[in-house]
Amino acid sequence: MLAPSVTTVARHTTFQLTADPSVEQAHALARHVGAARFAFNQCLRLHLDARTQPHGDRGDGGAGDGVRVPWSGFDFINAFNAWKCSQAAGRRFLIGSDGGAVVEVTGLAWRGEVSAQVFEEAAVDLGKALRAWTDSRRGKRAGRKVGHPRFKKKTDRDSFRMRNKTAKGRASIRVGEDHPRSVTLPGIGVVRVHDDTRRLRRMLAAGRARILFATVSRRGGRWRISLNVQAADLHPAHQHPARDSDDHRGWAGIDRGLHAPVVVATADGTQTMRVDAAPKAAKTAQPKTRRLAKAVSRKKKDSNNRKKSVARLARHHEQVRTRRQHFLHQVSNLLVKTHDRLVLEDLNVTGMMTNHHLAAAISDAAWGELARQITYKATWRGGTVLVADRWFPSSKTCSACGVVKQALTLAERVFTCDACGITLDRDLNAAINLAAWGEKNYSQAPDPEARGRVTNAHRRDGSGPRARAGETSLEDVGTGYAPAA
Ligand SMILES: [Zn+2]
């Protein structure tokens, strides 16, 4: 038997709560949202102003010799702090006793009305956005091209983030303080929430969890509080037992498809799981989406009725999204509970999305999100996930004799091998091939002894279900969202 992995990867989960703020609190939350947007935009302005100076550093490596251009989150925090107290941020003209005008520097007048952390986190966000842009431009970043950060506008998806700071042994973000269903936020107070917080409170009390951040967002007219939590490892009873180091078997391949969302099989041809019907969330909801979108377009611009229609449409989109996420979490939970060794195909989702006929269906199936969930959840349970390389022809290969077919259209639901004559379900064939790929390639994978190891892990953005295990990496805190589960 192997010893459990000693490299403890911190388990980051998010707890999604729906807030029920008082009228005053809602105003305060809205003020913080506005402040976060303002700070982001002001930092961007400071950055662009400095960059367009003749001797500014343009971020292409060549250092400017004159003006120092802020690039990192740290730079922006300093730049914003200096700016907010300066004459540029606010001043007042006073008439002195001798009748002459005196300029009094007031700085940003309302800076005391919101928590300074909101400014800092917005500055950090801009630093990250600029980083993503420069990395993408230099080809150091995989995936879609990242554009230059733009000024933020007022939208329905506004949010702000606060870090949990500890002072005198007391955390600034607390749960269930005045009421079991409440979250205490610095500068805002005890905000009631709709959700049960018992599990989180118990974890916090037992020292098995620590709140790192709170992200407050408004979506579809609703306030949500997302708590980013660092949690202890799952109880060993919820983890898969370790396998012997020379055991290369027991892999199950996962075929994700448009027809059957998930088909799982082992190398010997046993189908271990099959999900036939996905709630094609967006498609099912389409008539309603169309109706609501039309209602918006019929309303007069800038009218109150239009605002109401927009809110209705946003609420609808939110429901569709929640339903889809709920389904993905159910599938990924079941998968990682019942399998300890999984193989995923490396779907070039970004590339496939350029096929417009498939794009809507693929985005609905949310393949990338499913892979992400499987990957992090498997790690928590001591399982292993391998990603087959992109060019492995899992669909075109015959799982019986290994002959690769030249052509296979998407419409062919049944795989028929021209060489050996076997006929089987197309998705099942692909899943078997992936499982076989795992058995064949696992021995070559470096350090097979590390339990819970994940190869070629996907980008970890987004988060998990409400009040359950989900994950957000620290780099992406605040961008994620998790639904009910
Ligand atoms: Zn064959």
Image (tube, rainbow, N blue to C red):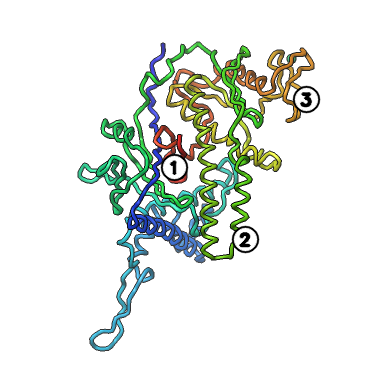
Q: Residues within 10 Å of mark 2 (few under 14, many from 20)?
A: few
First in sequence, mark 1 or 3: give its number.
3
> 74 or 368: which is nearer to us?
368
How far across and down, in percent of the image, does residue 245 sit? 47, 13
Q: CA distance from mark 1 to mark 3?
A: 43 Å
The numbered disc on residue 406 is 3
Q: CA distance from mark 2 to mark 1?
A: 41 Å
Residue 420 can be seen, yes or no:
yes
Q: Residues within 10 Å of mark 1 (few under 14, many from 20)?
A: few
Q: Is residue 339 left or right of residue 426?
A: left
Quarter of the C terminus within the rendering = top left
**Residue at (53%, 42%) from the top-left corner?**
321
Quarter of the N terminus within the rendering = top left
Instruction: Identify residue type, mark 1.
Output: Glu
The numbered disc on residue 475 is 1
Q: Is residue 322 left or right of residue 410?
A: left
Task: Check mark 1 vs ligand 1: CB closer than 8 Å? yes or no.
Answer: no
Q: Is residue 482 above or below residue 26?
A: above
Q: Is residue 271 above or below residue 290?
A: above
Of badges 2 and 1, the one in the foreground is: 2
First in sequence, mark 2 or 3: give its number.
2
Instruction: Identify residue type, mark 2.
Output: Arg
